[in-house]
Amino acid sequence: MNPQTQQIQIKVDDATLKGVYANMMGVAHTKEEFVLDFINIYPAQATGVATARVIVSPGHMKRILSAIKDNIEKYEKNFGTIKAADAPASGEVGFKG
């Protein structure tokens, strides 16, 4: 094992392991942090529920962005190009933080 490599064991409770569904995400930031709100919108009801909020430092956000980009490239190499979902129509979805 590389002297700079450290193995980390992470405990995950059952509820977290199950995960939550989100079909929308809002992002806000200050100089010190990025706030990612994952939201599940119910179109027929025109309502939504924030299912998770993740707050990270700008440096960590940059690493997250890089990891997501890398994984999308790997996914598309194996399964084909992902078609981006259409954005909601103007005024279709409102979010109060």
Image (cartoon, grey):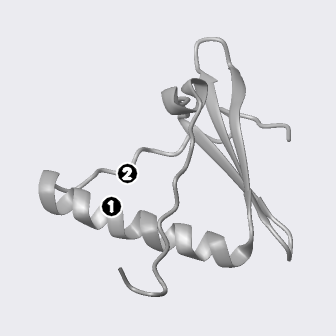
Judging from the image, what secondary structure is the residue with disc 1 in?
Answer: helix
Q: Nearer the viewer, mark 1 or mark 2?
A: 1
Residue 70: image x %, image y %?
35, 70
Tell me where residue 3 sits by quadrant. bottom left
Proximity of marks 1 and 2: CB atoms separated by less than 8 Å:
no
Q: Number of callouts in the render? A: 2
Q: In this view, does 59 lie above or below 29?
A: below
Q: Is residue 45 above or below residue 15?
A: above
Report the side of 36 relative to 62 (left or right): right
Crowding around mark 1 (Cα neighbors within 10 Å: few <14, some 14 to 19, many 20+) is: some
Above or below for 15 versus 91: above
- Mark 2 is on which residue type? Ala
In the image, taking residue 66 as reference, residue 90 lies left or right, namely right
Q: What residue type is labelled 1?
A: Ile
Identify the disc placed on residue 84. 2
Q: Spot the residue most to the top.
A: 45
Taking the image as shown, residue 85 lies to the left or right of residue 46, namely left
Q: Is residue 51 left or right of residue 31?
A: left
Secondary element type, mark 2: loop
Q: Report the residue at 27% width, 66% height from top.
A: 73
Residue at 35 percent across and 80 percent down: it is 1
Q: Which comes before the other along the chain, label 1 or label 2? A: 1
Q: Residue placed at 15% from the left, 51% from the top? A: 79
Q: Nearer the viewer, residue 21 or 90?
A: 21
Residue 72 circle label: 1
Q: Position of residue 94 (x, y in %)?
A: 75, 35
Q: Which of 15 and 95 is in front in this view?
A: 15
